[in-house]
Structure formats: structure tokens, C-alpha cells
């Protein structure tokens, strides 16, 4: 089944946090917090502005993003747990260090 978000909504797959601490201690599932990092799977066409023109989203498929702990709506699609959220719920895009150095 395919899914296409509407307007300024985004479909996100959570990126699971490490199961061990830096010191090597294994964290049990019950003590883990929900990851606040994810990968964008699908994006909507964008929201309409006051003039009725389509404003495309800044987020693209494949972007690695950071979002709030309680952001979005959890859904199950093809047996996979995913999130649907608005672009405004996203705090930022995580870029690779090489990309950041080239821009500077």
C-alpha cells in the first residue's frame, strides 16, 4: 500500500536510539525514551498561502530530521510504525558534517 500525505504533512520513520550508553551499559526497552530523530519517507505538496498559491515544503524525502517528543500522530502502515506530522512540528534537518563544512 502506498501513502501520499496531503498539504504540509510529512510521513516519518523513527530512527531508533542506541541500545548502549557510551560506557557500554545496555539500556532495556522499558527505560528507553521515544526517539526524536527520524527519516522522511513522504512529503505532501505543500500548504496554500493567503493568495491561494502552493508553498512547497522545505523538507524532502530522505532528510534526517529532529522533532518534538510528542509530535505527530502514530500510525501503522504495512506493519511498520510511522508518524504523520506537519512541517511546523519539525525543529530542524540533521545534515552530514561534510555538507556543513562545504557550506561554511
Image: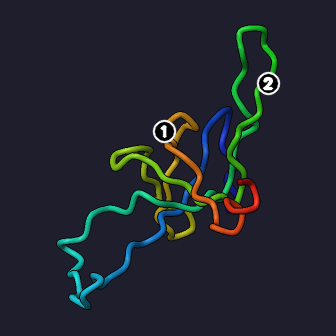
Q: Which residue lies furthest to the front in this view?
A: 104
Residue 96 location, quadrant: bottom right
Q: Which of 37 and 95 is in front in this view?
A: 95
| Horizontal arrangement in the rendering, residue 48 relative to residue 92 (left or right) | right
At x 43% / y 46%, what residue is drawn?
Answer: 73
Q: Is residue 27 left or right of residue 37?
A: left
Q: Name the one closer to the observer, 32 or 42.
A: 32
Pinpoint residue 104: horizontal percent, then vertical percent. 71, 54
Which residue is drawn at the image coordinates 21% and 88% (left, top)?
25
Instruction: Tell me: residue 72, above or below residue 29.
Output: above
Q: Where is residue 98 in the image (x, y as percent from the top left)?
A: 70, 69
Element assignment for label 1: helix
Mark 2: which secondary structure?
strand
Give the percent coordinates (x, y) of residue 80. 51, 68
**Apparent side of residue 22 relative to residue 102 in the rendered image (left or right):** left
Q: What x and y, as percent, mark residue 30?
A: 18, 73
- Is the image coloured rainbow, by chain, by secondary structure, or in one colour? rainbow
Q: Distance between the residues labelled 2 and 1?
A: 19 Å
Give the mark, 2 or 1, whose residue is nearer the N terminus: 2
- The residue at 71%/37% (across/down) is 57
- The residue beneath circle 1 is 89
> Which labelled disc corresponds to residue 54?
2
Amino acid at each position: 500500500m502506498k501513502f501520499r500525505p496531503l498539504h504540509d504533512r510529512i510521513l516519518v520513520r523513527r530512527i531508533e536510539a542506541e541500545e548502549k550508553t557510551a560506557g557500554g551499559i545496555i539500556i532495556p526497552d522499558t527505560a528507553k525514551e521515544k526517539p526524536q530523530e527520524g527519516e522522511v519517507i513522504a512529503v505532501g505538496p505543500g500548504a496554500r498561502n493567503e493568495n491561494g498559491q502552493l508553498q512547497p515544503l522545505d523538507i524532502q524525502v530522505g532528510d534526517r530530521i529532529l522533532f518534538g517528543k510528542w509530535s505527530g500522530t502514530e500510525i501503522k502502515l504495512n506493519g511498520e510504525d510511522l508518524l504523520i506530522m506537519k512541517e511546523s512540528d519539525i525543529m530542524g534537518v540533521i545534515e552530514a558534517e561534510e555538507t556543513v563544512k562545504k557550506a561554511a
